[in-house]
Amino acid sequence: MEELLADAVNVLVVIVEACAALVIIVGALWAFGRFVWVAVRQRDDRSFVSVRLTLGRFLLLGLEFQLASDVLRTAVAPSFEELGKLAIVATIRTALNWFLGKEIAEERQQVAERHEESDGSPDGDRRERAT
């Protein structure tokens, strides 16, 4: 029974790893397409930030899938060696996720601040309309 469960988990690990790869590939292609569009049409350095944010989101999701596959891999009767490897890999991937998520949040905040600056504050809009 344990062998059957191990075989099923191994199949699931392959599927989840394939999903991770697919998410990262789709994200890279999507970001590359947006990069080309921005480079050709807009030529605005600030527009590249949205491309980075998009790629970052896909990478975060891909890393989450990879972490899930690592957890699945050790789901059936793990050895201490496998648990140690999982702990190391999970720590590294969690740190990558945390730093990438933090960078994405900072980029979003900068984009929002730039957007507010270009649109002006609500009080500034009222003053402009009144004159």
Image (spheres, rainbow, N blue to C red):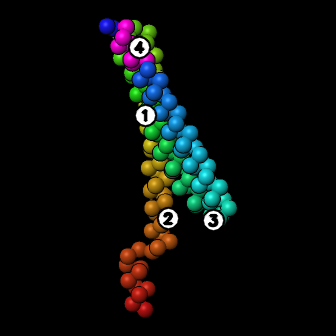
* Residue at 56% from the left image edge and 53% from the top image edge: 51
User: Disc 1 marks which residue?
Assistant: 64
Amino acid residing under circle 4: Asp
Closest to the camera, between mark 2 and mark 4, is 4
Question: Mark 1 vs mark 2: which is more N-terminal?
Answer: 1
Disc 3 and disc 1: Cα gap in Å? 33 Å
Residue 11 picture quarter: top left
Q: Nearer the viewer, residue 102 or 15?
A: 15
Three-letter residue code for mark 2: Arg
For label 2, the crowd category at 10 Å Cα-Cα, with few meaning under 14, some 14 to 19 and many 20 or more, is few
Q: Which residues are magenta?
A: 3-10
Q: Where does the image place residue 17, in percent across and percent down from the top left? A: 48, 28
Disc 4: which residue: 7
Q: Residues within 10 Å of mark 4 (few under 14, many from 20)?
A: few
Alpha carbon of mark 2 to alpha carbon of mark 4: how far? 52 Å
How far is mark 3 from mark 4, CA to CA? Answer: 51 Å
* First of labels 3, 4 by sequence position: 4
Name the image quarter holding the N terminus.
Answer: top left
Secondary structure, mark 2, is helix
Q: Which residue is mark 2?
A: 114
SS of the residue under disc 1: helix
Element type where label 3 sits in the image: helix
